[in-house]
Amino acid sequence: MLVDGIPTRVRIDFHYNEMPRELGDCRTQAFCMILNHYGYEITAQEIFGIGSGLDFHIKNINYNGFDLPLISGRNFDAENNCCKILQIPCKEQTLVYNSDISSGNLCFDRDILEILVEGRPVLIQCDVYYMTYLSDIKRNHNQYHMIIILGFDLESREFTVLDSVSGQVHTIAMSQLYMSMFEKYYGDEKVGIWYDIKQPENICNQRKQIDKYIESFMNQGNSIIKNDGYLEEIKKYIDFLNRIRECAKQGSVNHDNYLKFILEMNCILIRKQDELNGSCFRHLYEKYLNEVSTHLSLNNELWNDLVMYIQQSEAAFKALSFKVRYYNGTTYEKCEMFIQNLEKIYKAEKELGTKLMNIRRNLQDEK
């Protein structure tokens, strides 16, 4: 039976292996599951590393009615970047909000339904807060959550989805998933994002593409140390905190309260990111380094340095979410601790970026 040319029911035969929570967040794992489904041998840490996943991203959000510059430690384009480097057909698509879509016969975007009919799973970016089937975790608003649509039923108006957070297949109302793509907790932008990944025509073993590893290190190193790279965002954020602190010291109650709010909420939200992801993003990149070390012939000293710097950065991120958050002191003392750990991240990743940029030269010297 067809509804406006679309079959009433579709279910894709999708085989996947449940992944440990510490191996990437929902985005990385969702991409990994689809690529593995297409026969591409790649791990979550390889996707994150090849796509230059490390970042220091600041996004201005509205949290409980207050403007808040939120810290994130990952590049949200990492998975798409990885596909580009490996020449895997992956297209990021945008969806404009349609307030009347629920009253139509299809009650969802036709392009997405047609791709599912063709037998290709679809990646949907949504807010995890609306994924009510995740009843065993505390859901907080995170509009970068990623799920895989495996099928639909137009009669019951439900999707069949795979969520890496639970590692299970669930059903969710089409209207609810549609809402989760647009009801942005951190802003009013009415644009949904989804990804169409096609099976590569010539699937090769990524592990044999040593040049791709080297390219990924060069790209990641460049994104760290270039003049407008993300390390400069850390310096800007430190300057921002210092300006607020100085105004607070001069007697501005509003600046004092705002500083306290920024510090507290960033510590909480960094921790919530780690809880949802299963680990710190720096830990994931360390796993990538360890995995690549079995394929590249580099001296032990260089590898040890790379791991040491990424561990130093990870420790500073964890200090933000634990030590700073629970420090029982004044707002100014807490701000100083916060800034000190940002400076540790800056120093460690500056060294990391320099080392990554020298890997090609090191390989040439080894030869």
Image (spheres, rainbow, N blue to C red):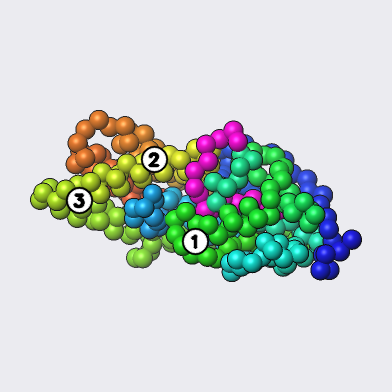
- Which residue has dot 2 on it? 268
The answer for how far apart the CA atoms under marks 1 and 2 are is: 31 Å
In this orientation, which residue lies closer to the viewer: 296 or 133? Answer: 133
Q: Residue at x 49, y 61 (%)?
A: 219
Where is residue 156? Give x, y as percent: 77, 51
Amino acid tagged 1 = Asn
- Which residue has dot 3 on it? 254
Mark whose residue sits in front, 1 or 2: 2
Q: Residue at x 57, y 44 (%)?
A: 24
Q: Residue at x 81, y 61 (%)?
A: 117
Q: Are dots 3 and 1 in contact, CB under 8 Å?
A: no
Mark number displayed over residue 219: 1
The residue segment tinted magenta is: 135-152
Packing grade of label 1 (10 A; few <14, some 14-19, many >=20) is some
Amino acid tagged 3 = Asn
* Secondary structure under the numbered disc 2 in the rendered image: helix
* Secondary structure under the numbered disc 1 in the rendered image: helix
* Secondary structure under the numbered disc 3 in the rendered image: helix
Q: Locate the C terminus and report the quarter of the image it occupies.
A: bottom right
Instruction: Give the left or right position of residue 61, taking residue 131 as reference.
Output: left
> Which quadrant holds residue 317?
top left
Packing grade of label 2 (10 A; few <14, some 14-19, many >=20) is some
Q: Please say whether residue 327 is one of the residues in the magenta stretch.
A: no
